[in-house]
Amino acid sequence: MRKTTIEDWLTDLASELPAPGGGAAAGMGAAMAAALVSMVCNLTIGKPKFAEHEAVMREALAEAERLRLEALQLAEDDAEAFSGVVAAYKLPKSSDEEKAARTAAIQAGLVEAAAVPLAVARVSAEVIKLSGRILEGSNPNVISDVAVAASAAKSALESAALNVDINVVAIKDPAERERLASTLNEALQAKVQAEAIMQIVAKRIRA
């Protein structure tokens, strides 16, 4: 994904291939949201008019760059995790031993397949919080991009949540299911902040 063109990646996404799919798309959405935060920071840093926000913007830029790279890696990891589940389902099941080994492999694969979008959800929530952090000090010429970053991160968060849920329902271990669900619910709390950022920016644009 780091070396392919956007056009080629979208062609793969649109094809009959099982991966990349929705999980990878969520990761890419989070990466784009983080990139927008970086853009706003870059267009604010170094301008005397916003000097009082320089330190915050520089810190936010470094964090946004880290999150963008993490989200991109997770988009790649998602395809691998899904392939692991598919491979587990294809394992032989002729004997009781084979059935047990197959079931164990499937369950391990499902946990991993849920862990990747769960990480995307966490990254998306962090991008939303970062958008809120830079809102007040951002260059007003790109204030709409702060809202777009929050909106894109919210969409990535919701998309990632769906990919967590589709795997969690097939996981048999109640403790593991509870752990994944609890972590996801914590990340989902950021949706409220994303909506607030979008409303604030909308009012400023229309003022």
Image: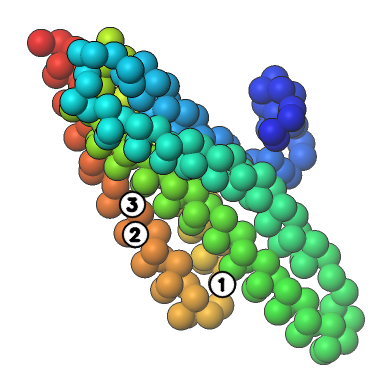
Q: Is residue 66 visible?
A: yes
Of marks 2 and 1, the one in the foreground: 2
Cβ atoms at labels 2 and 3 below 8 Å apart: yes
Q: In this view, which residue lies farthest toward the left?
A: 207
In the image, what residue type sits under mark 3? Leu
Q: Residue 11 placed where, x, y %?
A: 73, 25
Which quadrant, please, contains the C terminus? top left
Picture residue at 27% right of the left edge, 27% below the top: 54
Q: Which mark is residue 185?
A: 2
In the image, what residue type sits under mark 2? Asn
Picture residue at 56% right of the left edge, 77% below the top: 172
Residue assigned mark 1:
171
Asked which secondary structure carries label 1, the reply is: loop
Asked which secondary structure carries label 2, the reply is: helix
Residue assigned mark 3:
188
Q: Residue 79 placed where, x, y %?
A: 69, 48
| Crowdedness near tag 1: few (<14), some (14–19) or many (≥20) residues, C-alpha within 10 Å | some
79 relative to 149 in the view: left or right? right
